[in-house]
Image (cartoon, rainbow, N blue to C red):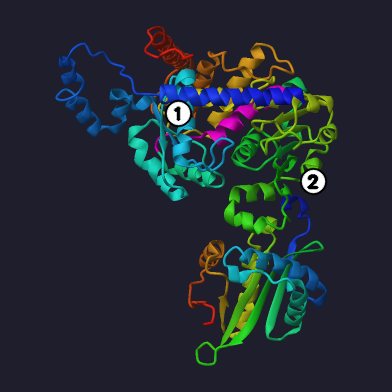
Amino acid sequence: MIGKLSKQEVILRRAKESDAEKILDLLLRLKRLNEEFDPLYKVAEDASTVGIKYVRDAINSDDCLVVVAQHGTKIVGVIKVDFRKRIFYEPRSDAHIVDLYVMPEYRRNKYGQKLIDYVMKEAKDHGGIVTVEFPSANKISTDFYEKLGFRPILNTYVRHPVE
Amino acid sequence: MSSVSQEEAETKKTSELSLRLHEYYKGKIEVELKCPVSSFQDFSVWYTPGVAKPSLAIADDADLSYEYTNRGNLIAILSDGSRVLGLGKVGPYAALPVMEGKSLLYKYLGGVDAYPIVVGTETAEELVRTALYLSPSFGGINLEDIEAPKCFSVLEQLRKDSTIPVWHDDQQGTATVTIAALKNALNLTSRKLKESKVALVGAGAASVATARLLFLSGLPKESLIVCDSHGILHPEREDLDKLQLRNPWKYSLAIETNGERKKGGIKEALEGADICISAAAPGPGVIKPDWVSKMSKMSIVFALANPVPEIWPREAKNAGAAIVATGRSDFPNQVNNSLVFPAVFRGALDVRARSITDEMCLAAADSLASYAEVRGLTDTHILPTMDEWELYTYEAAAVGTKAIAQNLARRTKSESELRDMAYRKISSARNKVKVLMKEGLIPNVPG
């Protein structure tokens, strides 16, 4: 299908503030998918309102990196990374992928991988590692990241506090 | 209106009769002998010590089980009862009468011994494992009434792992007979599939398989529009991520079809379409006459839901459809799996096929379409009917021949040999019933 549209190439670039709303659309799709994996990932009613601030802040922050894949005028993929300090460990910095989403019909074309490569380069400049978080029940993500050479390093467990 | 209530009364009468007769006959199938027993001396040939000889021969070469046992004419009808007819998830016990009915059709129409195996498990993995464990007993496996999307993964896995042919009738049977009917409908309306626009209404087992056979028959993927209960499938639909997770088959359709990027429901899907194939919810009124009138001229409408088609044939015709087919025998052009599955397994078994491919399905569809064509196509005759029973012999031979051509057969026969074999086996099955009825060994229907 994208064969037809793809007179123009898909380009990767850093996000601008004017991309914020389109990026939010993609992120909300990702968050709604997460609902499938655990009831604690139920998307909040005001997600779009708080989400737009989240996206704008990330775009404007030096502690984050937001990169988009653009096809024509459409934003078809996004990656959002938080740069974190690892004060007790070497290497000292971590480019942590919080969100990665590619529109369904653009999948299987390696745009996800290219977005990660983009982050990898930045991480290399920082001399750090790249980590990623996603719901443990998401098998598609597990397969995807393991294929790209990632391995599990951290468990996150959850329970409600004692009532 | 009166005709509808008449139909309802008729259906009720049939149901009550069915219950009474099932009780009277205690089911529909039993095991009969196929070798002579004149005295107890014969047992030493049929059983121990004589039987050791064929047994040891098979121990050396498992394929000899086709020569020395009934395995080569025996299939399992395997079901978990998770989606039985229009009844839904009724479970394995309740599925049994349906599976026995299927067995009856296999024997009477195809000369195939088909044994019902209903199982108390529901996971795809266990169904696959069960089928694999059972395969030394059988020459093939018919998966039946297993819900989507589980049925897709079970069939896909077994098509890879099983050394005997596995068939899921709700997918492949329905798709094959649909393609046969469509071939003749295209012929009558002077259309080519590759230049046609097709709307598939419903995205269940039958529709997913039909889409696959349509593509294999030359329909460009972007010329197909698929509509499920949430509307037209398209790549930007909100639920696509969930589909990728839960139903990758439907997900692929969403990504690959609908070149025009249409959005909306059945109404929008039908606008400008040449062909509507609906295997969705029972009607009437699921498809509105107004929507059919917005299709292209001389349109083709297959409304296949049972017991009531998505639109009554007369309504579809009045709205401009040139050819209408349904799943029912009381309307012209019945698109019925029973025209396909007995012959597919007859052909697959007679060449001892390792699997049943989509190409073999298309060979069956071609044979079925030609059988109707040589008897004269009209808008009310695009398919033969079950009582033209010789059609099964041609169809079986076509399936067997395709299996040989695809290197999937354990033995080679000419097409005419295959037809003769099918003829002998099917007429023998029919004659046995006749004789048993005549002798009173199958008692007459009481009352």
* Residue B263 sits inside the magenta stretch: no
Q: Amino acid at mark 1?
A: Glu
Q: In the picture shown, does residue B271 fall above or below B23?
A: below
Q: Secondary structure at mark 2?
A: loop
Residue B264: percent from left, percent from top: 79, 48
Q: Going 68% across and 31% down the picture, which residue do you hit? A: B308
In the rendered image, residue B51, in percent from the top left (x then y), is placed at 19, 25
Judged left or right of residue B148, residue A23 is right
Instruction: State the image quarter where residue A54 is shown.
Output: bottom right
Going from N to C along the chain, the mark reached first, 1 or 2, is 1
Which quarter of the picture shows residue B172?
top right
Pointer 2 residue: B260
Badge 1: chain ID: B
Residue closest to the eye, B135 or B130 = B130
Amino acid identity at mark 2: Glu
Is residue B128 rendered to the left or right of residue B340?
Answer: left
What is the x, y in percent for residue B433?
Answer: 42, 13
CA gap between label 1 and label 2 equals 45 Å
Q: Is residue A42 left or right of residue A146?
A: right
User: Which secondary structure class fits the magenta region best?
Assistant: helix
Residue denoted by label 1: B100
Q: Is residue B170 left or right of residue A56?
A: left
